[in-house]
């Protein structure tokens, strides 16, 4: 009951309803519109643009399998964006999710095929390894920031670039590379290490897997952590005002390191669930820019766990719909990247949206 | 009494710091000998000029084992000296040790083979150009207190515009349009952060993602089906008479294309502009204390717009280097993080154009190292060599940033009072 009172208070405030619902919705629609405009400007016919638009919607929410694809694409985004949201709360801009996903995925692959273990135990080990390596990788940036003041934006980007090279090297190691293959591709993980599909009983082709359930648990956990624990309070204090938190007795260096490592842990989980739930092995591009999409997701969700959940599903829908668009209208997936960038710009500039659509905000 | 206490405390910290640095240098020297010195035989031959050059220099031949041993010993000696003397400033010793370590590494890689040192230095200068230009763009923006994380995207946009328009209109007009496209993104950034007061880092990241998306999209939709639109004529190198015939230096600095010459020109002119003209002084005032600048009648908003656009134009020019200055064709994401490395060079150069140029040369060296060492077939995997520039960036940002001070008002939106 208390929760509902809280909820109704929350939504009765006109300002917040605009902030959390109206602006993201307008931003998304405007971005999709501009994306299609780009399609027409670059020489496609209006017919193709309309086909693309229809495919974008039917491919994301049009059928059970479309919804399954949307949730499948949303799963790694939820993890990675939660990590970035934790960073935002602590005043850190973690662009390194991509690299942390790669490291997490590498650890997952290595655990997945190296030894046989009973089903649940193997899966647990795989996820833990992914989370741990992701956390270690992010720890580097956090530690550098806390001890030397090196800006995390630059160090995480450099670590991303290093991660790509590490992955290239990793996939060519004789112990990792699939037997009889010359291209960089890892061995496949054992079945005992795979995340089971949740809708298997309806149709074995529905790809949405246990990772989505774990992601929901992660959302709840991060919500609790940020808003109901001392650590979460310290994150927010450091993020809001570093100097004040220092005078208040918070060990800000430690907080930065913990927040960054937690962000890496979640991104590492994104990589591990992607390997274990969908791909089964690693290839050079397996991270597929999830780490960068996750930045947009975290911004769109205003660094709030619930917001992250919904915006992940929105972005999952964009990706699933984008794939359908690619198939039916032959439009490259890069258009989705453009739309995502536009969404970030509009979300980050609410003044712009208010000026463009004054009648909505009367 | 109080003073004395503080002084003691200060000395104590200083000795502790020099002890740590000295010990790490000794350890470093030991490691260098262990990794490179043991088991190395033969001589390393460094070619300084081609036999066809008018003034050919003889090859530089170094006995590998003794050279590496000597370098390691010298590094350890510097470490010992720092511990004993605790000098005020040990940057010079660290720089020397760094240089010796690189030399030892090169000698180790070349032992028993021959390697063109001049070629490597030439590649260093070429590879430093986009980094230096990115750093100049960063300086222009940050001097007026606008963080420009979007330089990477502006470089990419310049590269794409250079390839596309260069293929249609020829390389000169392609270059001009690349500069204008860069300036356009500068304008967008300025509009977002100055007018709409978007968080500067978010705006920059959005520009990066946007440019990556739109250039990849257009590459797939436009350039793949029309390959003639992605085949721009490149700028050939111009040999400056007389100067280009100086051994080593001639080929390194005076047999390059216009990007190298313009880059040096931009460094000089922006140094003069920022530090010797009234406009430069105003720009720096806006970066340090916008409110004070506004009180003196300087328009903060106009100044920020102008400089961010200028920065964007420099980045567009730097981006054109990737296509018009080297290969003539555009590939998705071809800038490979050079914009961010440029920002690191800017920090390393302490927001000064000349400093940033030298920092860029350091990064250019790391960048050319991986390219040239591939020829020598060292046992180090190529992936690890390719990490060199990124690792150097992290080390530089981590090692320097504590001492470097950005302009005071950096990252803050300016709200004009009515």
Image (spheres, coloured by chain):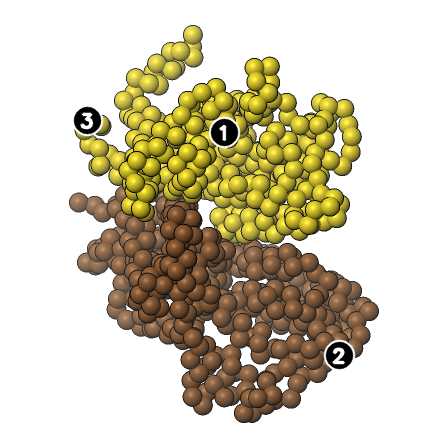
Q: Quadrant of the C terminus of chain B?
A: top left
For residue A355, what is the image quadrant? top left
Q: Can you tell which chain is drawn brown?
A: B
Tell me if B3 is positioned left or right of A175 in this view. left
For residue B87, what is the image quadrant? bottom right
Q: Tell which residue pokes out farthest to the right in this image.
A: B39
Give the secondary structure at mark 1.
helix
Q: Nearer the viewer, mark 2 or mark 3?
A: 2
Task: Examine the rendered structure and indicate whether residue B344 appears above or below residue B273.
Answer: above
For disc 3, the neighbor class at 10 Å (few under 14, some 14 to 19, many from 20) is few
Separation of marks 2 and 3 at Cα, in angstroms: 80 Å
- Find out whether the residues at labels 1 and 2 contact each other: C-beta distance under 8 Å: no
Separation of marks 3 and 1 at Cα, in angstroms: 34 Å
Q: Can you tell which chain is drawn yellow?
A: A
Residue beneath disc 3: A362
Residue beneath disc 1: A74
User: Where in the figure is residue A195, as x and y percent of width and height?
Assistant: 64, 25
| Chain of the residue that carries numbered disc 2 in the rendered image | B
- The answer to which of B13 and B186 lies nearer the viewer is B186
Please give the name of the residue rendered at 46% of the width and 81% of the height, measured from the top-left corner: B254
| Chain of the residue that carries numbered disc 1 in the rendered image | A
User: Where in the figure is residue B268, as x and y percent of width and height?
Assistant: 37, 74
- Find out whether the residues at labels 2 and 3 contact each other: C-beta distance under 8 Å: no
Residue beneath disc 2: B43
Res. B374 visible in picture = yes
Q: Nearer the viewer, mark 1 or mark 2?
A: 1
- The answer to which of A229 and A170 lies nearer the viewer is A170
Q: Nearer the viewer, mark 3 or mark 1?
A: 1
Please give the name of the residue rendered at 70% of the width and 61% of the height, measured from the top-left corner: B380
Please give the name of the residue rendered at 70% of the width and 66% of the height, measured from the top-left corner: B377
For disc 1, the neighbor class at 10 Å (few under 14, some 14 to 19, many from 20) is many
């Amino acid at each position: 009951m208390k929760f509902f009172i809280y909820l109704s208070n929350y939504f009765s405030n006109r300002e917040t309803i605009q902030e959390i619902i109206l602006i993201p919705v307008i931003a998304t629609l405007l971005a999709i519109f501009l994306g299609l405009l780009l399609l027409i400007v670059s020489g496609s016919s209006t017919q193709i643009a309309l086909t693309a638009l229809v495919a974008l919607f039917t491919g994301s929410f049009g059928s059970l399998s479309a919804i399954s694809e949307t949730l499948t694409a949303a799963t790694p985004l939820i993890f990675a964006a939660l990590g970035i949201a934790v960073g935002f709360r602590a005043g850190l801009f973690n662009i390194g999710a991509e690299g942390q996903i790669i490291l997490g995925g590498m650890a997952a692959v290595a655990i997945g095929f190296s030894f046989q273990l009973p089903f649940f135990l193997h899966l647990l080990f795989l996820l833990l390894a992914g989370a741990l390596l992701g956390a270690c990788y992010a720890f580097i940036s956090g530690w550098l920031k806390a001890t030397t003041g090196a800006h995390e934006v630059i160090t995480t980007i450099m670590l991303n670039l290093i991660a790509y090279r590490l992955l290239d090297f990793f996939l060519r190691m004789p112990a990792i590379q699939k037997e009889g293959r010359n291209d960089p591709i890892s061995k496949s993980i054992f079945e005992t290490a795979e995340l089971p599909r949740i809708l298997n009983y309806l149709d074995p082709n529905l790809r949405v897997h246990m990772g989505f359930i774990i992601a929901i648990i992660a959302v709840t956990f991060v919500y609790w952590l940020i808003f109901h624990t001392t650590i979460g309070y310290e994150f927010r204090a450091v993020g809001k005002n570093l100097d004040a938190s220092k005078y208040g007795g918070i060990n800000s260096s430690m907080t930065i390191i913990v927040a960054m490592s937690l962000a890496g842990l979640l991104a590492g989980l994104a990589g591990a669930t992607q390997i274990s739930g969908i791909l089964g092995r690693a290839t050079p591009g397996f991270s597929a820019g999830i780490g960068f999409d996750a930045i947009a997701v975290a911004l769109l969700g205003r660094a709030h766990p619930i917001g992250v959940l919904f915006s992940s599903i929105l972005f999952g829908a964009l990706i699933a719909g984008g794939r359908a668009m690619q198939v039916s209208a032959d439009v490259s997936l890069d258009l989705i990247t453009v739309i995502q960038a536009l969404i970030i710009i509009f979300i980050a500039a609410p003044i712009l949206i208010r000026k463009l659509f004054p009648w909505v905000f009367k | 009494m109080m003073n004395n206490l503080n002084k003691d405390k200060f000395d104590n910290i200083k000795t502790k710091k020099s002890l740590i640095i000295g010990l790490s240098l000794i350890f470093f020297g030991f490691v260098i000998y262990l990794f490179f010195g043991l088991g190395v035989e033969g001589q390393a031959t460094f070619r300084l000029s081609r036999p066809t050059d008018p003034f050919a220099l003889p090859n530089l031949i170094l006995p590998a084992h003794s050279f590496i041993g000597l370098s390691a010993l010298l590094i350890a000696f510097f470490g010992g000296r720092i511990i004993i003397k605790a000098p005020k400033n040990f940057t010079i010793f660290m720089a020397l040790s760094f240089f010796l370590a690189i030399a030892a590494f090169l000698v180790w890689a070349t032992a028993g083979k021959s390697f063109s040192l001049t070629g490597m230095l030439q590649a260093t200068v070429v590879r430093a150009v986009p980094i230096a230009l990115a750093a100049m763009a960063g300086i222009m923006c940050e001097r007026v207190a606008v963080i420009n994380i979007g330089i990477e995207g502006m470089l990419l946009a310049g590269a794409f515009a250079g390839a596309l328009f260069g293929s249609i209109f020829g390389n000169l007009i392609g270059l001009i349009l690349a500069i204008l496209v860069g300036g356009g993104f500068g304008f967008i950034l300025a509009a977002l952060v100055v007018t709409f007061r978007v968080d500067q880092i978010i705006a920059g990241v959005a520009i990066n993602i946007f440019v990556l998306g739109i250039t990849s999209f257009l590459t797939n939709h436009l350039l793949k089906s029309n390959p003639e639109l992605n085949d721009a004529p490149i700028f050939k190198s111009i040999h400056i008479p007389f100067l280009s015939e100086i051994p080593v230096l001639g080929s390194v600095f005076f047999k390059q294309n216009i990007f190298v010459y313009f880059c040096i020109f931009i460094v000089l002119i922006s140094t003069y502009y920022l530090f010797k003209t009234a406009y430069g002084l105003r720009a720096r005032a806006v970066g340090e204390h916008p409110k004070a600048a506004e009180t003196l009648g300087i328009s903060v908003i106009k100044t920020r717009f102008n400089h961010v656009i200028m920065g964007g134009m420099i980045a567009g020019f730097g981006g054109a280097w990737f296509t018009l200055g080297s290969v003539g064709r555009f590939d998705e994401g071809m800038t490979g993080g050079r914009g961010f490395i440029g920002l690191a060079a800017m920090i390393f150069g302490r927001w000064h154009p000349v400093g940033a140029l030298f920092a860029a040369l350091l990064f250019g060296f790391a960048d050319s190292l991986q390219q040239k060492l591939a020829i020598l077939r060292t046992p180090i995997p190529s992936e690890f060599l390719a990490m060199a520039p990124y690792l150097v960036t992290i080390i530089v940002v981590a090692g320097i940033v504590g001492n470097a001070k950005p302009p005071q008002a950096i990252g803050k939106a300016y709200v004009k009072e009515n």
